[in-house]
Amino acid sequence: MEGGVHKPDASAFRECLSLSYKNPYVLRLAFSAGIGGLLFGYDTGVISGALLYIRDDFKDVGRKVWLQEAVVSTAIAGAIIGAAIGGWINDKYGRKIAIMLADLLFLLGSVIMAAAPSSVILIVGRVFVGLGVGMASMASPLYISEASPTKVRGALVSLNSFLITGGQFLSYLINLAFTKAPGTWRWMLGVAAAPALIQLVLMFFLPESPRWLYRKGKEDKAKETLIKVYQEKSLVDAEVQALKESVELEEKEAANSEKISIMKMLKTKTVRRALYAGVGLQFFQQFTGINTVMYYSPTIVQLAGFASNRTAMLLSLITSGLNAFGSILSIYFVDKAGRKKLALISLCGVAISLAILTATFRHTETHSPMISALDTSHFSNNTCTAFSKAANPAVWDCTACLKVDCGFCASSNKLMPGACLNPNDITKKMCQNDHRAWYTRGCPSNLGWLALLSLALYIIFFSPGMGTVPWVINSEIYPLRYRGICGGIASTTVWVSNLVVSQSFLSLTKAIGTAWTFMLFGIVAVVGFFYVAIVVPETKGVPIEEVESMLEERALHFRFWEKKTAPPNKQ
């Protein structure tokens, strides 16, 4: 394994599958740590459905868009702090301790959310869950990467991404299961305590990362774990030698400096280049809008013209299922096609999908059903206040009605003129008693199916590439001495970007419209394509200890289509 790119003799995916009978211990390590990804995914998905019912239970949340964004984004704010301190905890106390601490925080947060008597206490619970998710988002892929054989490292780290999307799919199933149960959203949020408790127990019986152990001078314990991971003595010896060389180089650098600092890191060429690639990937992953789709998927479905909460969640289940399917594809392709090529194909498809979404929502906004003054008058004193005071109500359509926070009661033919009414439970019930659909998020449209199709296309392209590649690259690109700190910076970038996008999404759709919001994400995807093509190196099959040498060679990678040659053998 020393001295070059490891070339798989078949495919890493098949090799990964063969571990189930050749060496199940490695899969046990990966699955146990990967539950952190499941928790991350579950929280991302569950809040999207729970929010529909939280709005009904807590009227202050239903009335204020910023409060709905706060219920979602305070968990992300917690995750920023969790990711920031997670790097330090990973380096000082180990990857295993960081994962177990994340489980405890997630467990506590789930209990607080399930019992929350008000929106304030609910938000407090969301912060605790966020702290756990942020810490796990970095520790889990790092643990898997450092405890995996080089040949299947990418596939096993992709397993973490699959469990993220699997958690999202599971959350939609659980959301649907509890739609008619007393307490609805409380069950949805409380169930998350179960996988956190399971991972806490499993991790207790697993060893620490062999690379962390070796770096801390616990060579014998590290070798014990490596023997279980690699099994063959020659491979174990090669890995130990590579670790020894890596740690010696690190100690040599450390002897010339008093402590790790941001300035020291940025002055180190390999670290700086690694951060450009890793942090850049995480930035573009978030600003292409994936978590607005996951956090607000049912709401987006309603914006596309599907009024029912249950229908919105059922259709969202399809996008979540496609996300999980895409992660399975990534496990196969990430070590076969390569990280960089997968990311570029992904960004290209995402840009096309977002262009279709922009055109579809723009058509919906400009061709929504008109408001009938006669129909509206049939609802006596429930006419929308803004509509009744309008200087020219004849030009009002459904889009204008929803912009002033009123509700649209569609006619039996949803595309025909309807009524613009004050949004409260009484008018909603009156409308539905007439067997008419009630809209407060989006307007009826004959292109709703196209919006769903392009949303599905977006997920299919995003999940196998940009959904997985940033996590894989960040788990293997940083020099050992800086890995925890750099991983913390990358994870913090994820959560800060996530916070900005999720906290502003609903406000943006209200201020500039859903179409232009998706167009902004599309522009970011195009910029991201060129950034990845030029800045991000290909790490497929490169042993972690040799990634640093590769970064030393060059900073820019314009000819990304060319096959990378192996670095020269060490003498």
Image: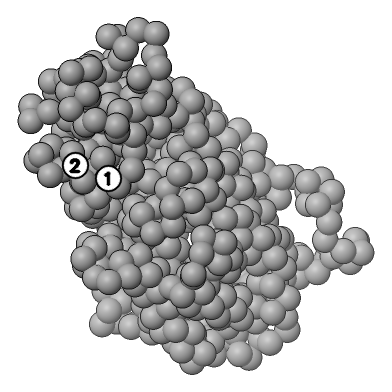
Residue 7: assigned label:
none
Q: Evaluate if marks 2 and 1 touch, with contact meaning CB atoms under 8 Å apart.
A: yes
Q: Which corner quadrant holds the C terminus?
A: bottom right
Give residue 90's position: percent from left, percent from top. 66, 72
Label 2 sits on a secondary structure element that is helix
Image: 26 above or below 184: below
Q: Amino acid at mark 1?
A: Ile
Q: Is residue 526 visible?
A: no
Q: Amino acid at mark 2?
A: Met
Q: Is residue 29 left or right of residue 454?
A: right
Label 1 sits on a secondary structure element that is helix
- Residue pointed to by mark 2: 430
Which residue is at a point 54% across and 87% down the rendered structure image?
A: 207
Give residue 479's position: percent from left, percent from top. 67, 59
Task: Give residue 531's quadrant in the image.
Answer: top right
Image: 6 above or below 494: below
Give residue 166's position: percent from left, percent from top. 31, 63
Which residue is at a point 76% across and 65% down the rendered structure image?
A: 250
Between 14 and 445, the residue placed more toward the observer is 445
Between 232 and 177, the residue placed more toward the observer is 177
Q: Is residue 290 left or right of residue 442?
A: right
Between 388 and 396, the residue placed more toward the observer is 388
Residue 426: assigned label:
1
